[in-house]
Amino acid sequence: MSPDLELKPGAWLIADAHYAHYRTDLYDFFDSLAPSDLPPQLLLMGDIFDLLFGYAPNSIEPNRKMVDLVLRIAKRCEVVYLEGNHDFGLVPIFGRALRVIPRGRQPLTARFGGLRVALHHGDTLQGWGYEAYTAVIRNRLVDGALNAVDTFTEGAIIGWLERYNRQKKPCYRIEGFEEKVRGRLETFSKRYDFDWWVEGHFHQDVETAVGQKRYRNLPAFGCGGGFVEILEKTGDIVFEKRTV
């Protein structure tokens, strides 16, 4: 697994903001930044949007303000976007303005000094049922058909998804999460060569290790405005939490 991204000191890793017109914390933060405040590298680690499907135009227009802001930021610094389970099919939206990493190309393998860092949104090892579901919802024909039904019903599908998401409680603790991480790292270690595994999705803001393999679950930006900045340390990497 050869590295295909060079991580830069000072890079920001932001996950699980779940932006929507009723949850604008990330937009407000980005909009407040001067160009000189931006990091040298911005990694958007999935679920930045609560509902954004590239082949369902009806999901794009409600997010247009945020999409345009991300595009403006991409003119100022390097932006890498790992698709999540709430935002996918993004190449038609962002084109070549930034680097989009679909789920099928994750983990994205990065290098920081002599360390290998595997980057994933986190929605993996979820069982065959989830794999079948996620394959269906990422199918452009399925998305196109759902978009057509949504148009015919004057927004019934997008409206239902929005109501469903608004009822969810994204800020929670998972009992026994570190034991879950142990099993994940044991499985990942058989498939990939890495020193650090970094992912979002679970909203736990946890750092741990199993043997020589280290793990960082990113904070959910949508739960208090937290994200991670990469700092240099002699022969190592530090994932420093920041809060806006």
Image: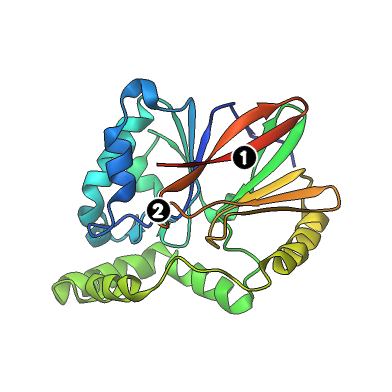
The percent coordinates of residue 136 (x first, y second) are 47, 71
Q: Is residue 92 above or below residue 16?
A: above
Amino acid type at image mark 1? Phe
Residue hosting label 1: 239
Q: Which class describes the residues within 10 Å of circle 2: few (<14), some (14-19), or many (20+)?
A: many
Q: Nearer the viewer, mark 1 or mark 2?
A: 1
Rendered-image quadrant of the N terminus: top right
Q: Quadrant of residue 162?
A: bottom left
In the image, taking residue 29 as reference, residue 89 lies left or right, namely right
The percent coordinates of residue 109 (x first, y second) are 66, 41
Q: Quadrant of residue 22?
A: bottom left
Question: What whole-number distance in Å separates the C-alpha atoms at marks 1 and 2?
Answer: 18 Å
The residue tagged with tag 1: helix, strand or loop? strand
- Image disc number at residue 137: none
Residue at point 26%, 67% (across, down): 147
Residue hosting label 2: 17
The residue tagged with tag 2: helix, strand or loop? loop
Check the image and name the residue furthest to the top: 36
Q: Is residue 185 above or below residue 12?
A: below
The percent coordinates of residue 72 (x first, y second) are 30, 31
